[in-house]
Amino acid sequence: GAVVSQHPSWVICKSGTSVKIECRSLDFQATTMFWYRQFPKQSLMLMATSNEGSKATYEQGVEKDKFLINHASLTLSTLTVTSAHPEDSSFYICSAVAQAGDTQYFGPGTRLTVL
Amino acid sequence: DQQVKQNSPSLSVQEGRISILNCDYTNSMFDYFLWYKKYPAEGPTFLISISSIKDKNEDGRFTVFLNKSAKHLSLHIVPSQPGDSAVYFCAATLTGTASKLTFGTGTRLQVTL
C-alpha cells in the first residue's frame, strides 16, 4: 500500500514553455501533498505544501506565480512550471500523507530539462 | 541555512560489516527524525524514524540512535548488504507542522563485496 505516482517521469521542454507534473496517491486519500526539488548532489528542498481544496503554502524564496500548485482532489496534486527556463531544470518529487503527522510517501520523481 | 547536515557525502563499507551514517541538526525544536533511502531517479523510501522522547529505535538490521544534547543522530546498518547501496537522507520535523520535513544533504553508501 501507500503508493504515490508521478507523471511524467521525465520531460524536456523549450525555454518559455509551461510544464505540468501530476502527483497521485494510488491507494489512499492524501489530505496533504508536498512538492520538493532536488538539484544534483544536493538535498531535497521543500517548495510548497498543498492541502486539498485550499491554496498551497510556499516556502520562502519559491515564486508562487511561477510554480502553480493545484490540489483539486484527495488523490491528485499538480505542479505547473510556468515559462520554464534552464535554471528550472531539476528533479521534482512529490510526497503525500493521509493525515497530518503521518509518514510521507514519495513519488518516483520527475526529471525536468529545460533547453 | 542548512538545519540538518550530513557531513559525510559518501561512505564505503564491506559487505557484512556495520555501516554508520551520521546526521547533525541545529534546530533544537525538531522532535521527530526520519531516515530515507534513495536510489537514482527514484523518490525516497522511508526506512526508520525516532521520536525525541527516545534515544534508540531498532527495526531489523537498522537502528537509529538519537543524542539530543549533541543534536546528533546516527543510522546503523548491520550487517551491510550490497542492496543497501544507495543515498541515505536524514530528515527532521516539528510536531504540529503537518509532516513538513527538513532534509539533510545525503550520504552515498557503497557496500562492497
Image (cartoon, coloured by chain):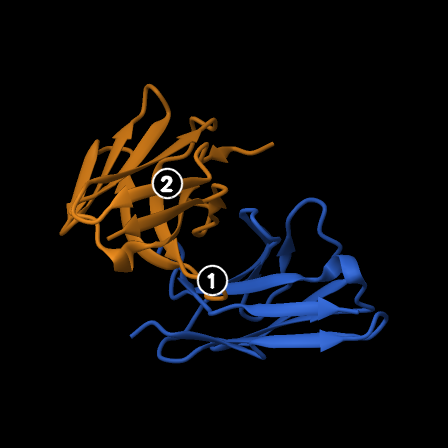
Q: From what the image shows, is residue A30 above or below residue B73?
A: below
Judge left or right: residue A76 versus residue A111: left
Q: Residue at 32% of width from left, 19% of height from top? A: B69
- What residue occupies the far front of the structure in this picture? B113
Q: Nearer the viewer, residue A76 or A93?
A: A93
Judge left or right: residue A108 versus residue B45: right
Q: Position of residue A62 (x, y in %)?
A: 71, 51
Provide the chain ID for the residue under circle 1. Answer: B
Q: Give the CA separation, mark 2 to mark 1.
A: 16 Å
Label 1 sits on a secondary structure element that is loop
Q: Amino acid at mark 2?
A: Leu
Q: Position of residue B58 (x, y in %)?
A: 16, 44
Q: Chain A appears what colour?
A: blue
Q: Which mark is residue B40?
A: 1
Q: Position of residue B41 (x, y in %)?
A: 50, 66
Q: Nearer the viewer, residue B91 or B17?
A: B17
- Among the chains, which one is orange? B
Label 2 sits on a secondary structure element that is strand
Q: Which mark is residue B11?
A: 2
